[in-house]
Image: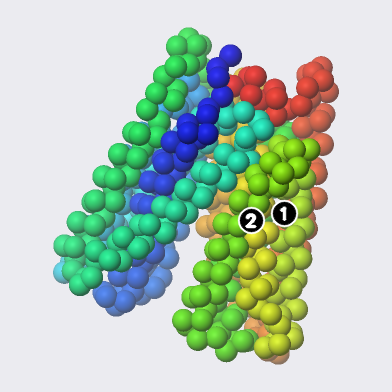
Amino acid sequence: MMRPLSWLGIVRMGLVQTGLGAIVVLTTSTLNRVMVVELALPAMLPGALVAIHYALQVFRPAWGHGSDRGARRTPWIIGGMAVLALGGFLAAVATAWMATQPLLGVALAIVAFCLIGGGVGAAGTSLLVLLAKRVDDKRRAAAATIVWVMMISGFIVTTGFAGHLLDPFSPSRLVAVSGGVSLIAMLLTFVGVWGVEGKVAAGLVAAPEKGSFRAAIKEVWAEPQARRFAIFVFVSMLAYSAQDLILEPFAGAVFAFTPGETTKLSSVQHGGTLLGMALVPLIGAMFPKTRGNLKVWTVGGCIASAIALLGLSTAAMVGGSWPLRANVFVLGVTNGAYAVAAIGSMMELVSAGGEKREGVRMGLWGAAQAIAFGIGGFVGTLASDVARLVLSSPALSYASVFAAEAGLFVVSAVMAVWVHRAQQRSARGAGRGVDLSNAAVAGG
C-alpha cells in the first residue's frame, strides 16, 4: 500500500494547478481585453473562443480513459500542460497577428483555443485522479482547498505580473509575456509531479486497463453513484456559474454602481470565495468529527448558497438600503465552501466503483463541470434578458433570475443526498462495512 502524500507533496502538486491557472487566465482575461479594446474587435469573438475551450473539454472522459489504459497519470499531466502552454502562446501570437491580418489571426486563435481546451482537460483530469489516489481521506478537503487556492493564486500573480510587463502595450510584448508564462508553467509542472508517481508506478503498470472507450464510459455511466454525481455536478455548477456575468450589471442597473465600484464588488466576492475554501479544512481541524464529512459540507454549501442568492433577489426588490457588499461577500463564502466540498467529493468517489476506471469517472465529472460553466454564463444573461422583456422592471427581472439560481442550488442539495444514498447501496452490495472514503484510499 502506498504512503499518502505529505502536506509538502500536496503543495507540490498544487504547483501544476498554479501553472494551469496562469495560462488560462492570461488567455481568457488579458487577451479578451486586448481583442475588444486595443484591436476594437467584436466582444463576441473572445466569447466564442472561450466557448471553444469549454466545448473541447467534453472529451475529458476519453482522455481519462487513455490514462487508465496506461495506468500512469504523469505523462498525461506533463503532455496536457505542454499542449496547454503551446496553445496559450499561439493564442497570444494570434491576437498580435489580428492587428495586421485579422482573418489569419482568428484562424490561428481557433486552433490555439482548441489546444487550450484539450490541454486543460487532459492535464486537469489526470492531476485530480493522481491527487485523489495519493491523498489520505482525512486530508481531502484540505488538499482540495490548497490546490484550488494555488490555482487562484496563479490567476492573481499572473494578472499582476502581466499587467506590469505589458505597459506600454505592444503586440510583441504580449507575445513575449505569454511565452514567459508558458515556460514558467511548464517548470512548475515538472517540479510538481517529479517523483510523485514513480515510487508506485511499477505496481500500476503491471496490469494496464484494456478495452474500448465506449465500453468504459458505458460501465461508468451504469454505476449509480458516478451517474448521479455527474448530474449533481452539472446542476450545481450551472447554479454556481450562472450569476457570474449578471452580478456586475445588476449592481449597476439596480444600485447605480459605477464600473469601478462593480469591479470592487467582484473582488469582494472572490475574497469571500477564498475564505469559504479555507473554512472547510479549518473547521475540520477545530472539530475533528466534521473532518472528511464532505456530504455535510456539500449539502450545507448548496443550501447556504441558495440563501445568499435569495438575499440578492431580495436586494433587487429593496434597492439601495440593502447591504449589497455584505450579501455578495457571503455568497462568495458559501460558494467557496461548496466548491471545496464538491471537489473533495470528486476525489473521494473517483475510486469507488469498477476497477481501473478512475480516469473515466473524473473525466465524466470534469466534462459535466466544463459544460455547465460553458453554458452557465450564457443561460444567466439570457434568462435576465427574457425576464426583462416579460416583467416590468430590471429589478424584477434580476430578482427572478437570482431566485431561480437559488432554486437550482436547493435541487443540488437534494441531489447530494441522492448521491450519498447510491454510495451506501454500493457499499452494502459489495459486502463491506467500511466507509467509501477509506475504500477509495485502500484501492488507490
Indicate the position of residue 55 as horizontal and vertical percent values. 47, 51
Q: Which mark is residue 301?
A: 1
Label 1 sits on what residue type?
A: Gly
- Using the rendered image of the protein, determine whether residue 408 is visible from the camera's viewpoint: no
Q: Residues within 10 Å of mark 1 (few under 14, many from 20)?
A: many
**Mark sitting earlier along the chain (2/1):** 2
Query: Where 434 falls versus 222 (above or below)?
Result: above
Location of residue 257 in the rendering, given as x and y in whole percent from the top left corner: 55, 86
Q: As rendered, which of 102 and 416 lies closer to the eye? A: 416
Residues at discs 2 and 1 in contact (Cβ within 8 Å): yes
Q: Nearer the viewer, residue 376 or 305?
A: 305
| Amino acid at pointer 2 | Gly
Snapshot quadrant of residue 365 = top right
Which quadrant holds the C terminus?
top right
**Horizontal and vertical percent position of residue 328:** 64, 71
For the point 66% across and 25% down, the residue is 440
The quarter holding residue 163 reads: bottom left
